[in-house]
Amino acid sequence: LAFVGAIALQATVGGAGFVPVSDRSEVFFIVETPPGSSLEYTRIKTEEAAAIARRHPEVAYTYTAIGTPLPLLVPSVDQAQVYVRLIPKAERSISQEELGQILRTETLSIGGATVSVFTSGFGGAFKQIQLQLSGDDPVTLTRIAQDVADRVRRIPGAVDVGLSTRGEKPELNVQLDRGLAGSLGITVGQVAQSLRPAFAGIDVGDWVDPTGETRDVEVRLAPEARERAGDLERLPLLVAGADGRPSVVPLGQIATITRGFGPAQITHLDREAVVMVQANTTGRSLNEVKADIDRIMAQEVQLPPGYSVSWGGEARDQQEVFTRIFTALGAAVMLMYLILVMQFGSFIDPLAILVSLPLSLIGVVLALLLTGDTMNIMSMIGVILLMGIVAKNAILLIDFAKWAREKDGLPLREALIEAGRIRLRPIIMTTVALIAGMIPVALGTGEGADFRAPLGRAVIGGVITSTLLTLLVIPTVYEIFDEWRAKAIGLFRRGARSGAPAPRVGHRVGEA
């Protein structure tokens, strides 16, 4: 009950996340301009975002890189990254997270660009939430993902919502009349080869410049000659005439060219097209926002047949890591139980000792709630550490009580009281020493030290409550288990006696 209640209370009130919020004195901007924007336009919008950051006295300097590949994206001049370095933590009056929220609000005034602010301090500009939508048709996926993104934007705590495709960009669609093209002897491959010089370009050789440097020569149509559908309709195609001589046929004669919009980027996962709805969180934990998204996907979004949804990013990493942590925790408790069985020579006595383990979770949850931390990977490591620490107090009590009963012949209750009196001093000494050693970690005053602070806070809270409750609960539980064992042995012995065969009574024939 203590274990279930503690975890439920923390998940309901404090929430859970993958990594704790860490102040490393750095903030990242990801600036995304409309697909197809020029380098100069992206530079102007990026400088606007950097200028907004430099207006704050907490910012030491900014560093801008345009065209760098963002996570899961290809390099392009319509995206940029701004690294914002802050002054040391001790010299600032606000935290990195608070400044990030202010910058996120101020950058909304930048028109013609989307600015995402990353303050997690975990290194890199990866959004925490990545909802992966998979299917066959990228166009349908983009439409569904856009609808989901609009719904996610209404969730409290979800910010910087966007798509991995970065919206749509203009494109020219060439629809070939296959019947007419086949009658003229033109294949789809020939049409593709004729379009290649217009867009991709072809390598035609080398050229030695006046300085003696050898350079590759590539031929491609000028940008103004490949932007309009009318220009492509006049693109010449060579076909064989009736007399065997080649003739020229314009592309527009055998194909229809229209303007449209398509995904700016197509990503595949497990051989399926995938579009990710990405977002950051602020003001709420990752699990709380994720729960709201799960509710929306279950109640408001109907996926067509053949399309599926899965989690990526920190949500998936959190599930994988927490599963492994709980598996390791279960294995550790089992090994601890087996070792205690061998040491005490009993299967019942170690159960009373293991009761002290969930008692520590009460202090863990209370400590995290008081400090405003979440149940994350660092606090879970602290829980694993606690499992080996808190069992020590119960072992001291139970071992001394068993020794007093066996050597001095004391009754059970008097032996437990004597064990509590004698072992109280070493228990308090080790508890105080452990708390004192964890105080610097729990304070997290250094640069980036708050990343490890939940570990220290979880250990301190768990040790305090487990020490207080162990002195009261463990003797009581041990006495109850001893009574149950005595009753079970008594019932077994009475059952054995009642089931024994009665002695045979009789006489031999011919005996007087």
Image (cartoon, rainbow, N blue to C red):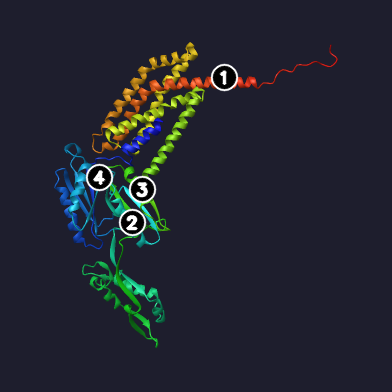
The disc at residue 145 is 2
User: Reading the chain from its start, which is encountered first: label 2 or label 3?
Assistant: 2
Q: Are marks 4 and 3 in contact (CB under 8 Å)?
A: no
What is the spatial separation of the Cα atoms under label 4 and label 3, in whole angstroms? 27 Å
Q: CA distance from mark 4 to mark 2?
A: 25 Å
Q: Where residue 14 appears, x then y in whole percent?
A: 31, 37
SS at mark 3?
A: helix
Given residues 127 and 3, the one toward you in this image is 3
- The image quadrant that residue 216 belongs to is bottom left
Which mark's residue is nearer the viewer, 1 or 4?
A: 1
User: Toward the viewer: 240 or 165?
Assistant: 165
Q: Answer above or below: position of 65 versus 412.
A: below
**Which amino acid, by three-letter code, is at mark 1?**
Gly
Numbered badge on residue 119:
4
Q: SS of the residue at dot 2? A: helix
The residue singled out by tag 1 in the image is 490
Please name which of the two marks, 4 or 2, marks the residue nearer to the observer: 2
At x 33% / y 82%, what residue is drawn?
A: 248
Foreground residue, 322 or 196?
322
Name, please, the residue furthest toward the front: 299
Q: CA distance from mark 2 to mark 3?
A: 16 Å
Position of the N terminus, as image quadrant, is: top left
Q: Establish if 300 lies above or below 91.
A: below
Q: CA distance from mark 1 to mark 4?
A: 65 Å
Residue drawn 27% across and 59% down? 76
